Image (spheres, rainbow, N blue to C red):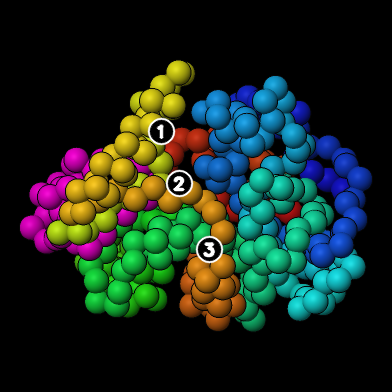
Amino acid sequence: MRAAIYERYGPPEVIRLGELPRPSPGPGELLVRVRATTVNRTDCGYLSGKPFPIRFFGGLRRPKVPVLGTEFAGEVTGLGEGVTGFSVGDRVCGYCERTFGAHGEYMTIAATRLVARIPEGRSFVEAAPSTEGSHYAILDLRAAGLRPGDDLLVYGASGAIGSAAVQLGKSMGLRVTAVCGTAHVDLVKGLGADRVIDFQTEDFTSDEQQYHMVFDAVGKSSFWKCRRLLRPKGVYTSTDLPRWGYLPGLFLFAFAGRLLLVLATRLGRRRRVLFIPPSGDTEGIALLKSLIESGEFRPVVDRTYPLEEIVDAYRYVETGQKVGNVVIEM
């Protein structure tokens, strides 16, 4: 099978197209013929091996797996022993961080992981980016304990996680204020946001409204800048560390600082900071699967590339300028 292969950490240019043996499904696994996948920030981190602690998961000296790709859409072509609930020919999409493999024509994944059926009328390109951004978004939204009618502010609402958070927030009955750049205001309004702030013409941190949650989906603000936006007992969370935290030698300081802030604000029992590790939330995953399968959640697609141009796709994602998701057609 064809695959985008990488054997050492580095820039996008270390990726090469090559041939690998087709995998076989083990007990409890699905074999999927991948028709579309994505390139996202997670893939870029594992490609570069930066920040260094990511290598504790991906391999200290060289990558553990030769093929990246955390999201996929395709057809089930084989079933491992004991698999129930899926059939050969099912159109599915899913999320496979840590095991990866979606940048190849075939991959295996445990049937118990985040795998959803693609709704009728939805193409593989539209379905492939349904899981990564929405997975992070729903974990954070649920951890904050929000209730219908609560006020949510999403900063970075045009990105993969932010655009998912806007839609998922509305599905939870929240009043959503979205922050994005001028060029993306209409797009974000179309996602269902009740109100949109253009950060290029207005300082969103000066907003007079207060929120039950401020969700920084791009890691470009801070609790201290957003603190006045929070109601008493309001929650601030960010999907990323500050930019300086990714400089050599500073990641652990930034990470420790975030944990200390989480503990300090929890003890204060007023406005607080949440840190949400990407762990399994079975109820959240079940909710996300139902939203994908019903067609209620629609990811935003920025650009599509053929597999032959996957290096260009990585270069574009690394600019930090993508809107929503970048899809690879296999």
Tell me: 315 left or right of 257: right
Inter-mark Cα distance, 2 to 1 = 26 Å
Q: Amino acid at mark 2?
A: Lys
Q: Earlier in the sequence, mark 3 or mark 2?
A: 3
Q: Position of residue 85 (x, y in %)?
A: 76, 78
Checking the image for residue 244, the label placed there is none
Q: Residue at x 34, y 61 (%)?
A: 144
Tell me: 330 left or right of 12: right
Checking the image for residue 322, the label placed there is 2
State whether residue 58 appears in this view: yes
* SS type, badge 1: helix
Q: Position of residue 11 (x, y in %)?
A: 60, 26
Q: Earlier in the sequence, mark 1 or mark 3?
A: 1
Q: Residue at x 26, y 59 (%)?
A: 213
**Quadrant of residue 289 within the rendered picture:** bottom right
- Give 7 or 151, whichever is nearer the viewer: 151
